[in-house]
Amino acid sequence: AMCFINAAIWMWRALQLLGDNCGGDGWLDDYIFEDIWSVPPDAKRLALQYSLKRAIFELVEYAGMMADSQLLPGPRLAVQRSAYLLLRRVAARFGVEDDAPQVLAQLKRMLAAARVNPLWAPPALLVTDAVFVDILSSRLHQAFMETLH
C-alpha cells in the first residue's frame, strides 16, 4: 500500500512541475497519446495535468482499500494519513468540486483507522505469555550455542 502512496507522491511532484512551468517537462512529449500530438503545448500540459491528477486519486484509493483489508492498525493509519494529506494537497492546488467526495471519503478512512490504532494504548500482553516467550527464546539460544560448540 505504501508503494502506491510513494508512486502517487512522485506523480504529485510531476504535477507540481507541470503546474509551475518550471522546466524539466521534456518528458511531456514522450508520454502524450498520439491523438493529441497536434494540439498546442498548453493543451498537452492541461491534458497531462488532468491525467496525473486522476492517476493520483486512483492510486490513493487503491492504497486505502489495500490498507483497510490487509494492514494492522498502526501501518493502516500511516497509509491512510499519508493518503489523506496527499489528496488534500492535490485537491487544494488542482482540485474541482467533483473531487470533494473522494477527499472526504479518505478523511473518513483516516479517522476510522485512527480509532482502532493502539498508538496511545500499547497492546496488553499477559505476563504468562511474556514468561513463555522468554523461556522459549532462551532455550532456542542455548540449543544454537550448543550446536556451535
Image (cartoon, grey):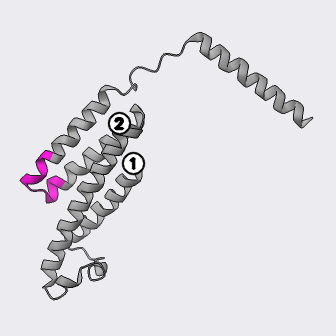
Residue 88 located within the stretch drawn in magenta: no
Picture layout, residue 124 above or below residue 3: above
Picture layout, residue 34 above or below residue 79: below
The residue shown at (34%, 38%) is 68
Give, as a three-letter code, the residue at label 2.
Answer: Leu
From the image, tell me which residue sits under label 2: 77
Closer-to-camera residue (34/46): 34
Q: Position of residue 58 (x, y in %)?
A: 26, 55
In the image as oriented, which residue stretches furthest toward the bottom?
A: 38
Instruction: Name the image quarter holding the C terminus.
Output: top right
Please give the range of residues in magenta: 91-101
In the image as oriented, which residue stretches furthest toward the front?
A: 69
Whole-angstrom CA distance, mark 2 to mark 1, is: 11 Å
From the image, tell me which residue sits under label 1: 1
Q: Position of residue 62 (x, y in %)?
A: 31, 50
Q: Position of residue 8 (x, y in %)?
A: 32, 57
